[in-house]
Image (cartoon, rainbow, N blue to C red):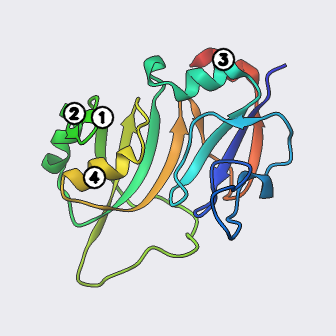
Amino acid sequence: MTRIILFNKPFGVLSQFTDTRSPTTRPTLSGFIDMPGVYPAGRLDRDSEGLLVLTDDGKLQAKISNPKHKLTKTYLVQVEGDPQDADLAPLRAGITLKDGPTQPAKARLIDPPDLWLRDPPVRFRKSVPDRWVEITISEGRNRQVRRMTAHIGFPTLRLVRWRVGSWTLDGISPGDWVQASAADTDRR
């Protein structure tokens, strides 16, 4: 039976179970999830938060993480500056980053979401406004969303992955996880 874990990864936690690259141990998934045989389906940067799907099913893992399957991922992104709707048009059309063109994204301005406080908090500057943007992509390149917002002139301050396919963070606190039903994978 396929096991699927939906984990709300806190800021600063690596998307792996061990840290072999740092002389000082950084927080990893092993500090939160004690279920042998499950592995992350994709990655979420250490300085990003939110939904990380783990599974013991290699085919499902590939389906979630491989862009050829076009599984969408939705991010809530706090950006520096005050973008207007027109500023998001390049994201919707697709932009060219150093590693090539991106697929068109869904991007829209949103009100500040009701999220948990981040530890450490996002830096606040009175003289520099910030806005929230919801971005949905079907790719998953290294730091893609951060590079996309920087490309249009609005660097990312905070990035929270809210949704992967039809799975969401609804009701999952930072550092907590729930087991999802394998039947949910049929809706992908």
Which residue carries the number 1 mark? Answer: 105
Q: CA distance from mark 3 to mark 4?
A: 32 Å
Callout 4: SS: helix
Vertical relation: 23 (above or below) 97: below
Residue 159: percent from left, percent from top: 45, 56
Going by the numbered disc 4, the residue's amino acid type is Thr
Residue 109 in sight from this viewpoint: no
Whichever of labels 4 and 2 marks the residue nearer the N terminus, that label is 2
Marks 2 and 1: which is nearer the front?
2
Residue 184 in sight from this viewpoint: yes
Whichever of labels 2 and 1 marks the residue nearer the N terminus, that label is 2
Going by the numbered disc 1, the residue's amino acid type is Ala
Vertical relation: 93 (above or below) 130: above
Q: Which quadrant of the rendered structure holds the N terminus?
A: top right
Which residue lies most toward the left here? 86
| Residue at 44% in and 18% down | 68
Which residue carries the number 4 mark? Answer: 149
Which residue carries the number 3 mark? Answer: 59
Q: CA distance from mark 4 to mark 2?
A: 12 Å
Callout 3: SS: helix
Which residue carries the number 2 mark? Answer: 94
Marks 1 and 3: which is nearer the front?
3
Whichever of labels 2 and 3 marks the residue nearer the N terminus, that label is 3
Q: How many badges with numbers are in the image?
A: 4
Vertical relation: 148 (above or below) 48: above
Q: CA distance from mark 1 to mark 3?
A: 26 Å
Marks 2 and 3: which is nearer the front?
3
Going by the numbered disc 2, the residue's amino acid type is Gly
Neighbours of disc 4 within 10 Å: few (<14), some (14-19), many (20+): many
Residue 144: percent from left, percent from top: 37, 44
Q: CA distance from mark 2 to mark 3?
A: 29 Å
